[in-house]
Image (tube, rainbow, N blue to C red):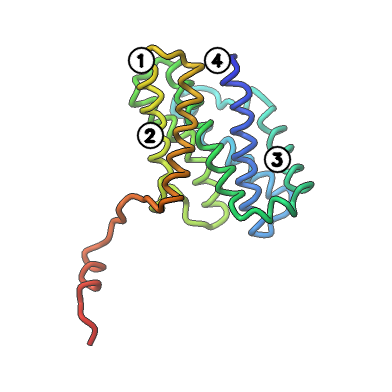
């Protein structure tokens, strides 16, 4: 696991997720410490749930760099606040980058533990999406995971791409970045072309839609 893809992208993914959490926290007028907590939860929440399910010590308890990286993200937000706030798509950009990188890292970690591919995809999806869910819940927002946006499904697609390339005898170091980019690409295409999963409506809602106005 101590290779280029699991060190630098891990920090980039942590930074990106922390930035997305801090950016959203800024809209709620929380203080600096609160913003740090939201950024940290966004960055490590999914990986923590993954490690607990795998019955191993959560990764951030063994390495302080996740706290440091979140602190750097907060500092960057404070220094470049005006520029970051001016970009309307900043939150989406950082969230998408974090989603792609962290998902594949989660899958790789689960593979190293010897689990079958479908479990690895589930764990990768948890790693990529649960931090955002915790962020949204703490900030009293409807989690993206529960909305019609392509979010968790992008993680699943990226995981399938990863295993497809591995089946084609591609090395992990080559397949992983491609799979991470596929997660990001799915998110970008879905947003750009307004692609989303069908919305589940109740029978009552359908009845209301078919009633003629009096």
Residue occupying the point 49% across, 18% down = 174
Q: Nearer the viewer, mark 4 or mark 1?
A: 1
Mark with earlier residue (3, 2): 3
Mark 3 surroundings within 10 Å by alpha-carbon count, few (fewer than 14), some (14 through 19), many (20 or more): many
Residue 69 x %, y %: 69, 33
The residue that mark 4 highlights is 1
Question: Alpha carbon of mark 3 to alpha carbon of mark 2: how far?
Answer: 28 Å
The residue that mark 1 highlights is 168
Mark with earlier residue (4, 1): 4
Question: Alpha carbon of mark 4 to alpha carbon of mark 3: how far?
Answer: 25 Å
Residue occupying the point 38% across, 31% down = 122
- As drawn, is 25 to the left or to the right of 203? right
Residue occupying the point 41% across, 24% down = 162
Element at label 1: loop
Question: Alpha carbon of mark 2 to alpha carbon of mark 4: how far?
Answer: 22 Å
Number of numbered discs visible in the structure rendering: 4
Element at label 2: helix
Give the quarter of the image for residue 76: top right
Mark with earlier residue (4, 3): 4
* Picture disc at residue 156: 2
């Amino acid at each position: 696991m101590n290779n280029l893809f699991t060190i630098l992208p891990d920090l980039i993914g942590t930074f990106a997720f922390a930035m997305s959490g801090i950016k959203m926290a800024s809209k709620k007028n929380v203080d600096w410490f609160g913003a740090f907590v939201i950024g940290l939860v966004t960055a490590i929440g999914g990986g923590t749930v993954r490690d607990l399910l795998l019955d191993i010590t959560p990764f951030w308890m063994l390495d302080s760099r996740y706290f440091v990286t979140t602190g750097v993200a907060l500092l960057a937000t404070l220094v470049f606040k005006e520029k970051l706030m001016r970009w309307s798509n900043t939150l989406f950009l950082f969230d998408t980058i974090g989603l792609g990188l962290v998902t594949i890292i989660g899958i790789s970690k689960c593979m190293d533990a010897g689990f079958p591919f479908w479990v690895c995809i589930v764990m990768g999806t948890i790693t990529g999406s649960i931090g955002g869910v915790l962020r949204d819940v703490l900030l009293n927002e409807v989690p993206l995971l529960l909305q019609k946006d392509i979010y968790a499904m992008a993680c699943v697609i990226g995981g399938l791409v990863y295993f497809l390339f591995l089946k084609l005898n591609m090395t992990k170091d080559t397949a992983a970045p491609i799979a991470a980019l596929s997660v990001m690409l799915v998110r970008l295409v879905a947003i750009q072309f307004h692609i989303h999963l069908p919305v589940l409506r109740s029978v009552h809602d359908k009845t209301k839609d078919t009633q003629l106005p009096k």
